[in-house]
Image: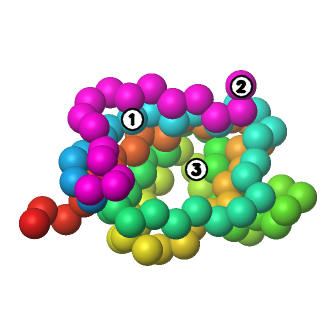
């Protein structure tokens, strides 16, 4: 397991750009992504537990480390990441599109 998600509520339809989704996202210890992410929906993220580093390089090194109880809100089209977690972490994420 590298990344594991549990959908808590909702459904996000990325093709038709509607809906909402709340999920838990878990990073296993030592896991890291190598590319930034971008998507067309809003994303609110709360770091429930563990450690999270944002902006590492392709080898998982560098950038800004965040402690538990950190909150971030990303608008559609915002590049973010890559991400790394040394000891593992749990994120609560809410994804949604602007109402039409």
Secondary structure under the numbered disc 3 in the rendered image: loop
- Vertical placement of 70 versus 58: above or below? above
Q: Secondary structure at mark 1?
A: strand
Identify the image quadrant of the N terminus: top right
Residue occupied by mark 3? 67
Per the model, the C-alpha gap separating discs 3 and 1 is 20 Å
Question: Is 94 on the left-hand or right-hand side of 4?
Answer: left
Question: Mark 2 highlights which residue?
Answer: 1
Q: Disc 2, disc 3: CB below 8 Å?
A: no
Q: What residue span does the magenta drawing correspond to? A: 1-16
Would you place residue 5 above or below residue 18 in this image? above
Whether the magenta-drawn stretch holds residue 12 is answered as yes
Which residue is denoted by mark 1 in the rendering?
A: 23
Is label 2 in a helix, a strand or a loop? loop
> Which residue is farthest left?
100
Picture quadrant of residue 92: top left
Kindly report which numbered mark, 3 or 1, lies closer to the viewer in this rendering: 1
Please tell me which residue is depicted at 67% across the width and 55% down the height of the picture.
83
**Disc number placed over residue 35 in the picture, else none:** none
Considering the image in quadrants, where does the C terminus appear? bottom left
Residue 64 visible in the displayed image: no
Relative side of 34 to 36, left or right? right
As measured in the structure, the alpha-carbon distance from the residue carrying label 2 to the one carrying label 3 is 22 Å
Q: Nearer the viewer, residue 57 or 88?
A: 57
């Amino acid at each position: 397991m590298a990344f594991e998600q549990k959908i808590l509520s909702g459904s996000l339809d990325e093709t038709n750009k509607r809906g909402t989704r709340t999920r838990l996202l878990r990073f296993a210890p030592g896991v890291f992504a190598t590319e930034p992410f971008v998507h067309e929906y809003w994303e609110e993220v709360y770091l429930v537990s563990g450690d999270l580093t944002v902006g590492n390089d392709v080898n998982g090194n560098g950038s800004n480390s965040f402690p538990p109880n950190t909150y971030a809100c990303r608008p559609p089209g915002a590049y973010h990441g890559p991400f790394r977690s040394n000891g593992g972490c749990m994120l609560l994420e809410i994804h949604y599109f602007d109402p039409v």
